[in-house]
Image: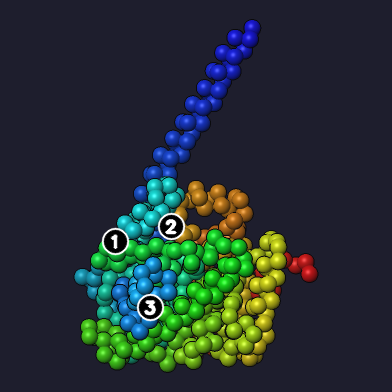
Amino acid sequence: MLKHILRRLVKAIAAVTLTVGIGVAALIAWLWLDHGRSTTLPVPTGTYKVGRGIYDWVDDTRLNPYAPVAGTKQELAVWVWYPASVTPSSQAAEYLPDYWVRAIEQHEGFVLGRLLSRDPRRVESHSWNDVDVSPQELMYPVILLRAGGGALSSDYTSLAEDLSSHGYVVVSFDAPYRTVITAFPDGRVMGRNAQSDFDSMAYAAAEKAATKAMGVWIMDAKFVLDRLQELNANDPTGQFKGKLNLEKVGIVGHSLGGATAAQFCHDDTRCEAGIDIDGIPFGSVVQDGLDQPFFFILSDHRKESGPEPRIVEAKMESIYSKLPTGKRWQVMIEGANHFTFSDQMFTKSPVLITALRTLGRLGTLEKRRGLVIAEGCVHTFFDVYLKGAPTEELTVLPSRYREIQADFTKAFPSDR
């Protein structure tokens, strides 16, 4: 009798194991097939075609404080999107150059880089490689774009392309040992190190490390603006000479990039307007406030718990309350999540996205809708403060996008 029961139990376990094995194999096969599917990013909403160039800039006046080798100069992989003049012979820009793809795949490994992500070679953006700047306008305002934490500049391609399509030169950069991975055409690849990996730290330690990193990012942003000034005066290629309106400079950043945007506007008078997308402010800007127009764009944090939401809200209110009337703007996007604003909603596997959404980690807003709203807010704000559009364009945003709440305090838990 006992042997009969054991035989049945063994058969049952074997059947369950086989079923699970078949299910896992089927899931892996489906993920692998999905990895190779084409992914098209949202189409830019402006009238300009978009050009893109990637550059290697070295700041000989500064050392990289995160480099493992003493004396290493600060070096940046700089991405530039701009209004373009496209001809029939122009070549479409790949989402990521091949040397970047190889570096990322090696860094992320088989599971994250292939099974849980779309193939970057099959992601279709809307830029053109190294084409001429559009002659439609004499000069174009310049927007610095700061990625969040260790995120890549390319993770914000949709936002950059949309801004450029509305007549802006958009400049972002990746930094060795701070960005999760930085690749250069000569084959060098540098990963993020423990000093700058504040995402894995406790809140207090993370704030200290992030504040230090933000200070370095601000110096990087100053260097990039200085280099753009040189190119505007005498670009050896002639591509950007006289095309950059550096009297009209804005900055937009996501997460820590948003905190950097606020502090950069505080520190550098060349900043005419700034946007913080879902970033916790740090630094002296929290106490001192700003003089420039500034825009807080927040995701929906109402279901979060713990002390952090209150800390974030207090910092934003401190800055906001010191902004002059007519220069302070804020919205909360209902159903949006912290990752709503980047291309990762498109470049990661839909299985991963669905799983995270089911767990309540990605909000309820449809991914394409989230980017459309964010892009609309960003280019409208800069249109007002860098191009002279009427402020009514900003006041009608809540009626244009039903998910927008025009009070950022509504983004946080209601219990007081």
Position of residue 164 relative to residue 11, above or below, is below
**Three-letter amino acid code at the position of disc 2:** Thr
Residue 54 image point, x, y percent:
31, 72
Q: Is residue 408 left or right of residue 46?
A: right
Quadrant where the N terminus is found in the figure? top right
Does residue 293 lie above or below 74 as drawn? below
- Which residue is at 38% across, 90% downward? 245
> Image point 44% across, 82% down: which residue?
219
Judge depth for marks 2 and 3 and give the one in front.
Answer: 3
Query: Quadrant of residue 7 in the image?
Result: top right
Q: Nearer the viewer, mark 1 or mark 3?
A: 3
Give 10 or 346, whichever is nearer the viewer: 10
Residue on which disc 1 sits? 99
Rendering coords of residue 225 (x, y %): 39, 85
Q: How is the image coloured?
A: rainbow
Task: State the SS at label 3.
Answer: strand
Determine the secondary structure under disc 2.
helix
| Image coordinates for residue 214, horizontal then vertical, percent | 50, 76
User: Residue placed at 25% from the left, 66% from the top?
Assistant: 186
User: Which label sits in the foreground, 1 or 2?
Assistant: 1
Question: What residue is rendered at 67% in x and 67% in y?
Answer: 308
Q: Residues within 10 Å of mark 3 (few under 14, many from 20)?
A: some
62 and 166: which one is in front?
Answer: 62
Which residue is under mark 2?
347
Between disc 1 and disc 3, whose residue precedes? 3
Q: Identity of the amino acid at label 1?
A: Tyr
| Residue labelled with disc 3 | 63
Q: Residues within 10 Å of mark 2 (few under 14, many from 20)?
A: many
